[in-house]
Image (cartoon, helix red, strand yellow):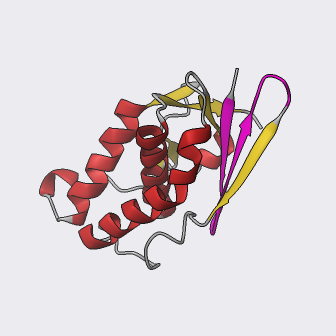
Amino acid sequence: MNTLRLDIGAAETTAVLSRPDGREERWRLPIGLVTLWPMPVSKQGPSALAIEHAIQTVEDAIQPLAGHIPAGARLVVAAWAMAPLQRAGAIWGLAHEAIGLTQIEREYQQLAARAVGAPSATGSGFDDPAGDALVLILRECLHHLGFDAVHLTAA
């Protein structure tokens, strides 16, 4: 099976497409957990304008991959890389082997609601502000590269 592995770092993301025959393609993307908006962010999270800018930044960075990802490929991320997705010390989503698009979209909607000060989003932030950036990067990859879930791996 074809897999696209994302190694999401602080300043950049490496994407590695592995094919069943052992061939690999590799891209270095200028997006990371602390590069999408100015740090530190408020407890509410980044502003709506910062989120819109970050969406465009991520879309621009991942667009070159779109024509290279075969239909039916699987998006994988190391389970340990999900550490920013914590609330009160519990890592959200790690009880499952995959985090579906619907779950990522729900988290993105909470981020967007916090950005505009919606009372319904109070307390929905992650312990680590990098969690918001991780959600945004995963959401854009799922949407624009045609995946329906992020599969978690041990490595």
Q: Position of residue 90 (x, y in %)?
A: 51, 43
Q: Quadrant of the C terminus?
A: top right
Which of the two residues, 13 or 81, is positioned nearer the viewer here? 13
Q: Quadrant of residue 84?
A: bottom right
Residue sitting farthest toward the front:
67
Which of the two residues, 41 or 138, is positioned nearer the viewer here? 138
Residue sitting farthest toward the left:
119
Give the magenta-colored segment's residue range: 3-22
Which of the two residues, 155 or 92, is positioned nearer the viewer here? 155
Q: Position of residue 89 (x, y in %)?
A: 52, 49
Residue sitting farthest toward the right:
22
Please tell me whether residue 72 is drawn above or below residue 23 in the rendered image.
Answer: above
Q: Position of residue 101 (x, y in %)?
A: 40, 33
| Residue 56 seen in the current view | yes
Which residue is painted at 43% across and 42% down in the image?
144
Q: Is residue 6 magenta?
A: yes
Dominant SS in magenta: strand
